[in-house]
Amino acid sequence: MIRGKEIMAQVDLEIGSLANNQNKLTVLFVVDRLEIMGGLETYLYHLCRELIKRGHKIILDCSYVSPIMKQLFSCAETLEAMTTEEIGRVIQKNNVDLIHCQPFESAERALVLHEQTKVPFVLTWHGAYYMDNFPAIAKKSEKIICVSEEVYDILLKKYPLAETKLVIIQNGIDINEFKPVACQGESKEITFIGRECLDRLAGLKFLIDSFSQSSFQKLNIVGFNKIKELEQYQQCNFVGEVADVREYINRADVVVATGRGIREALACGKACIVLSNWGYDGIVCPSTFKNLEYANFSGRGLAEPLSSERILHDLNVLMSTELRDKLGLYGRRLVEQFYDIEKIADKTEIVYWQAVEDSKLPKVSVLLPVYNHANFVGPCLMSLLNQTYQDFEIVIINDGSKDPLSQIISEFRDKRIRYIHREENKGLPKTLNEALRLSQGKYITWTSADNLHYENYLERLVEVLEREAECGSIYSDYLQIDQNTTIIKKVSKGIYTLNGETNYGPSFLYRFEAINRVGFFDENLFGIEDRDYSIRMAATAPVFWLPEVLYEYRIHQQSLTGKYVNKEIDFTPVIQAFSDKWKWLRQYPHSEAVSLERDEIVYGQRKILPVNMDCTVNSTMNKNLNFDPIFLGKFLFSVYRCFAQVDINHFLHDMLILRAELQFFCIRNDNKITQALTVHSVKEPWDEKELTWSNMPETESESIDEVLANNIYNWVSFDITGLVQSWADRSIANYGVCLRMKDEEQGEIVAGVNRHGINTMAHPRLVVEYTGKNRCLTC
């Protein structure tokens, strides 16, 4: 489901209809540190400068600013090393309209400032990484700007409820600064751009090896100071850190870089190669552009293994002056079309204005469909208007009532009430869907005119959903009352079970992001549309049970429940339709409300499954190393092994596994000579939180596959196709695998990223190609 205002926001972003808004904003940029001119810093500089040029006021909040960066950002007001209390006073004094932050410490600080000042904030996410507290930050932010489709997909997969807040805005380039310049013939120079660190060094070594075999004569290495192990390459010019890379871009025939460096080189009309520790993406050209842009020119677009032969081949191809000129024209056109800082600032301005306007909308929408309940609606409205939590709207739809409902409603002169009257009765599900379309709140509930609400009803439900970011909905206990408000009994649903039967009851609150994924009420299930919606909501995101009475549910002869009990309404066909709809869930119930994947299995699918358990063990320390990286081999006097397990329960027994590779990302190799790594099937259960060397599960002595430990910052892959097929067939139990070094007493440490690593893209994984019948877990 998507409301009209969300569609409007998307259209505005595409056509730029808000870009000419004459009102100017004061924006606080929260940044951790500004030390050197890297990709993030260049992005901030160009965006701030463009926004200031348009009349907006920019304030920078930083823990540290180097003298060089302070001079560069002199166009903005820069505040350094101030407490959140001090910045809060700055926000109030300057009437700051919006806070713009970056991931990690910056986002956490922005959240504190938002809660302190109630000023809305937006977050820009720059790379393929994740924060454990991202849901808590995302639910409080108004918008989340993703710099690439890859970032969008990562955040959406990790926290689906953020979907309505995610927008994609690429990094912008000042095309008047970065532009082609006339050159005197070919220079036969290559320029590499990268921040000095071990992961970039891994890719640089391959480039240097390829360059030394090519016809190019000079390699400028921007960002790296001279490295002792590479001193023998006399044609390499280690430039170090520079404030302006244009000189080295313009003098080169070919630029090798990632991210922003690629965009800047494209703007200057240069042929470009994307290379990083993640892999080799190759030459930027029409056939590769979309894949490369998807991953922000990071090396993860095509992610071919790093290979000197492949790089050398592309360098030889780019010896052609005609081809380089063509690619230069193509690259310049791409930047003018997609990355011009003015266009990027247009979109950013629109996101700012949307965030500011959205923050002014009511937090909660209470939907009140009414049909012939004029005698009850007064007390119901009074119980809502007297809530301790007051940030809400009430959307009342008169569904063709024949009683004096409109007259009763007119007596309530409260601006939070929106009243819609229609002559024709359309029934509850259709009326609820109309009210959903009209709603504006971030949280939504609906109620009936004959029911009553405790004064802290909204306060308690909102409080929990604000705290429990992973939950898409909440329900509470309630009382059943009769026509005279006499208590019949207390009803408590308890902890929710996703079994195809359970309803939340009448006291609940939905997060709009969850509603957006669930969609509208099923108009074919009149009378039990609420039960169906509870199941769909719980299948989309976890649900929270609050064991407190907050609501009074009235049962009387004119209510739907009363008419059903008195057999005035026959729900038999609807109940049968509902039963047919959820029969699969009653057969295979879930003990808790978790997201259900909706996968259709067809021929030749490729799936990447994350490791759900992994643990390294140590022969001498004999303690649990669950959160330690993957270690294999010997270090000092200790031998290390790693156990890993992947959940493949949704693979069905009649699938055919075409190929299955268990992979981990290698970040360290202490071996002077090549060492073999082996993988073994585990024969009994184990617990990653309890596993030590002394209680290791039994493993098969014969290895399934053997690979050679080689380059770091690359994937190590084990072929375990036969084992995974046995797991899928249920012929053997899936207790995972054990990774070890073949010669454990002689081989030095090989290390990799485990599933707790910050960068989710580097987590251990099972890559499976399979085939099977068409299936769907939901109807």
Image (cartoon, helix red, strand yellow):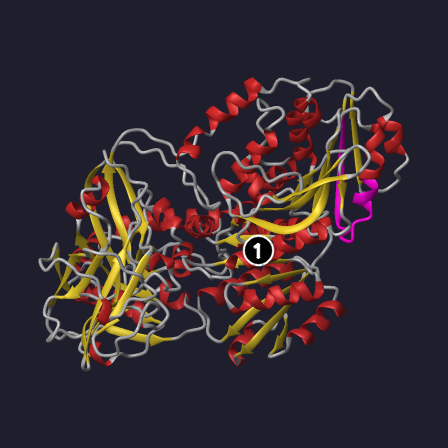
Q: Which quarter of the picture shows residue 241? A: bottom left
Question: Quadrant of the image for the N terminus?
Answer: top right
> What's the amino acid at mark 1?
Glu
Residue 282, percent from left and from top: 27, 53
For the C terminus, give its image quadrant.
top left
- How far from the left and from the top, in percent, is residue 767? 26, 48
The answer to whether residue 718 of the structure is visible from this angle is: yes
Q: Establish if 776 lies above or below 386.
A: above
Tell me: residue 668, above or below residue 568.
below
Q: Position of residue 265 (x, y in %)?
A: 38, 58
**Who is closer to the viewer here, 325 or 387?**
387
Element assignment for label 1:
loop
Instruction: Estimate the x, y position of residue 497 in percent, counting from the top left.
Output: 49, 43
In screen coordinates, is 416 left or right of 4?
right
Residue 675 is one of the magenta-drawn residues: no
Q: Is residue 14 visible?
A: no
Q: Quadrant of residue 596?
A: top left
| The one of 597 and 565 positioned closer to us in this rendering | 565
Q: Which residue is mark 1?
A: 468
For the image, the number of numbered tags is 1
Which residue: 79% across, 44% down? 384
Decide which of 754, 235 is in the foreground and name it: 754
* Left or right: 584 as drawn, with respect to 418: left
Circle 1 crowding by C-alpha within 10 Å: few under 14, some 14–19, many from 20: some
**Is residue 382 part of the magenta span, yes or no?**
yes
Query: Which residue: 55% across, 64% down?
Result: 107
In the image, which residues are magenta?
Answer: 381-398
Q: Horizontally, is 626 left or right of 340 in the view?
A: left
Give the residue drawn at x 76%, y 70%: 93
